[in-house]
Amino acid sequence: MIKFLSWLHGWVGATIGLLFGFLFLTGAVLMVETMIIQNDTASSLPKPAEQLSGEQIAANLETVLATGEQAGLQVATIRAPLAEIPGWRVAEQRGGQEVYLTQDTLEVVHPGHSAILDHPAVHAMLVAFTDWHVSLIDNTRWGGVVAIIGSVLGLVGIIIFWPWRRTFNWRNWSWPTKWNRATLMSNHLTAGMVSLVFLLFFGATGAVLEYRREISNILEPYEVKSLGDMEQRIEQLNRELGPPSIVISTERAQQPVVVAPARVSNQMAATDPAPAIPVPLIEAQPSRLPLSELAQRAMQVAEGRIPSDITGFNGDVVSFRMRYPENPIQPLGRTYVRLDTRTGELVSMELEEDRIFWRKAYHLSGPLHMGGEVTMIYQALSVIGSILVSIICFTGFVSFVRKRLVTTVA
C-alpha cells in the first residue's frame, strides 16, 4: 500500500505539483497586495478614540449617503467603520468608484496607495496573477481541480513519510541550503509537515470558492426551514416592530381630475370667458423611510448586532448586513435583515445562529481564503504558510526528477 501511495504521490505530484505551488505563490503575492492596500487605507484615516455604537451608526447613515452623493458617486453600498479600517466606506456597484469618510467628522478621504502598486509593471503583474490564481485557464475550473488534488497529495505525503518522522529537522524548514537529494527530501518532509495546515486549509477553501454554487445547492435541503414557520416568525417580528414613526404611503398619488369648461358661443366667450380651474398641488412624498429608522428596526430584529454593510436603499428593499460589535473572525457578520424601504416591514432575514455548521464554514471560506476581512497577523501567517507550500512543491518536483534521472542512468 505504501509503495502504491509513494508512486501516486511522486507521479501525480510531479505532474501538478508546480501548478499547485504556483497557485500558492500567486495567492501569497495577492495577500501581500491586500495587506498593503488595507494598511494604506487605515493609515489615511484618523484613528478614533472609540468605535461607534449601533445607535451612532444609524444616526449618521443619512449624512454619509448624502456626502457620498455630493462626492459624485451613485452610492450602492455603505460600510460602517471597522476596527481594522476606522472609516466609512461609500461605494458604487462592484468595480465602481469608492471613497472613505472619517468616522467622526465625515470628511471625504481618498486613500493613497504605495508607489510600488502604482508602477505599471507591478500593476500588470498583479492583474496577471489574479487571473491565473482564479483560473489557470480562462473560463475553466482547473484551479479548483488542482486545489483538490494537491490537498489529497498532502495527506498522502504525510502517510508516506510518517515512518521517517524522526528525520524531522527544524533547521531545514525553509529554502534548501544544499541541492543534493538527501537535503531536498529532508526539506520536503520538514517543510511539508510545518505547512500541512496551510496546504489543507487554503486548498479546501479555494475549492469551496470554486464550486460554491454546487456546494450551496447541496447544503440547502438540510437547513431550509418550512415556509410556514418562517412566515409566522416574520409576521410576529413585524407585530413587535410596530409602525414606523414616519408613515409613507405605498399607493401611487392620484392625479386630479380636470373638468373641461362647457362649450360656449364665441360671443359669450368674448364677454364672459370661462374661469380658470385651479390644479391642486401634490405634495411630494419621500421615496423611503430614513436610513436611521430602518437601521434601528434592523437592530431590533437582530438583537445584539449592529449594521456593517447597507445596500439596496435606492430600491424597494434595503438589506442590512449585521455583525456583533467585537468579532475578529467574522468582522462583517453573517446575519442579513431585509426591510421594505417605505413601510419598514421585515421582508426576510438570515440569522447566523440559524445556519448549520457546514453553512457557517461555507460562508467563512471567502474571507479566510482572501484575507480581506481579517487581521494583519492572520494575513502575515497566511503569506508565510503559502510560501512554504510553494517551496515543498518545488523541492518535491526537483527531487522526483533527480531520482528518475539517476534511475534512468543506472
Image (cartoon, rainbow, N blue to C red):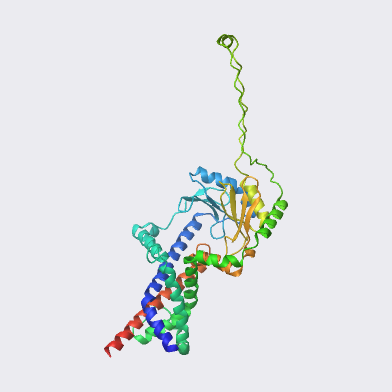
Residue 247 location, quadrant: top right
- In percent of the image, x 34 and y 60: which residue is there? 121
- Which is more toward the observer, 113 or 263? 263
Extreme-bottom residue of the structure: 410
On the rendered image, what quadrant is the N terminus found in? bottom left
Total numbered circles: 0
Left/right of residue 238 with respect to residue 186 in the rendered view: right
Extreme-left residue of the structure: 409
- In percent of the image, x 67 and y 58: which residue is there? 228
Return the x and y of residue 155 as percentages of the image width and height.
47, 80
- Which is more toward the observer, 161 or 143? 143
- In percent of the image, x 37 and y 83: which residue is there? 184
Return the x and y of residue 186 as percentages of the image width and height.
41, 85
Residue 248 location, quadrant: top right
Q: Is residue 292 above or below residue 349?
A: above
Residue 395 visible somewhere in the drawing: no
Residue 16 visible somewhere in the drawing: yes
Return the x and y of residue 180 as percentages of the image width and height.
34, 85
On the rendered image, what quadrant is the C terminus found in? bottom left
Q: Is residue 217 above or below residue 171?
A: above
Return the x and y of residue 397 as percentages of the image width and height.
36, 79
- Which is more toward the observer, 196 or 269? 269
